[in-house]
Amino acid sequence: MINISYYCLADNENCLELEVFKSLHNENFRNSYNLHSEDKLITHLYIKSESSTPFSQNELVDKELNKDGDNALPLVIINNEIIKRGDLLTVEELSDLLGIGISIQLDE
């Protein structure tokens, strides 16, 4: 099982890494991935500006916020371990983690 949780301060739609994660967080994608992969994918996206409750309920996140405040965000937790602080997973990191090719097209 791969359980990925993103804890973000705000929903920044201009952030490429967040938009890529949102596409993986989509129920249709997860269902398709789970059909074709040995690992089950579970994703969570928490936005502090929308609700701070999940941030205080997670012991790891709460500890980081008490130590560094909102400067600790974003946090990426995979299988109950903090993998990244202050930044999100890159497209390449997500691709490697899930064992799939991810390509993006940007409008210029």
Image (cartoon, rainbow, N blue to C red):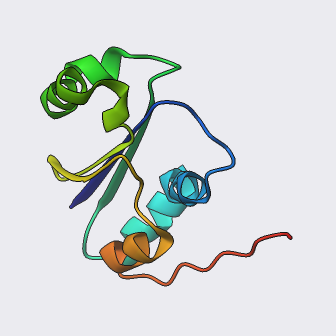
Q: Is residue 61 above or below residue 27?
A: above
At 62% across and 40% down in the image, what residue appears?
12
Q: Is residue 101 above or below residue 16?
A: below
At 19% across and 21% down in the image, what residue appears?
66
Say whether residue 76 is left or right of residue 49.
Answer: left
Q: Position of residue 38 (x, y in %)?
A: 25, 76
Picture quadrant of residue 105 = bottom right
Q: Position of residue 69 (x, y in %)?
A: 30, 24
Q: Is residue 54 above or below residue 20?
A: above
- Hey, which residue is sitting farthest right in the picture? 108
Label tally: 0
Say whether residue 91 is left or right of residue 6.
Answer: right
Front one among 30 and 104? 104
At 58% across and 57% down in the image, what residue appears?
23
Which quadrant: the N terminus?
bottom left
At 54% across and 78% down in the image, what residue appears?
102
Front one among 43 and 13? 13
Which quadrant: the C terminus?
bottom right
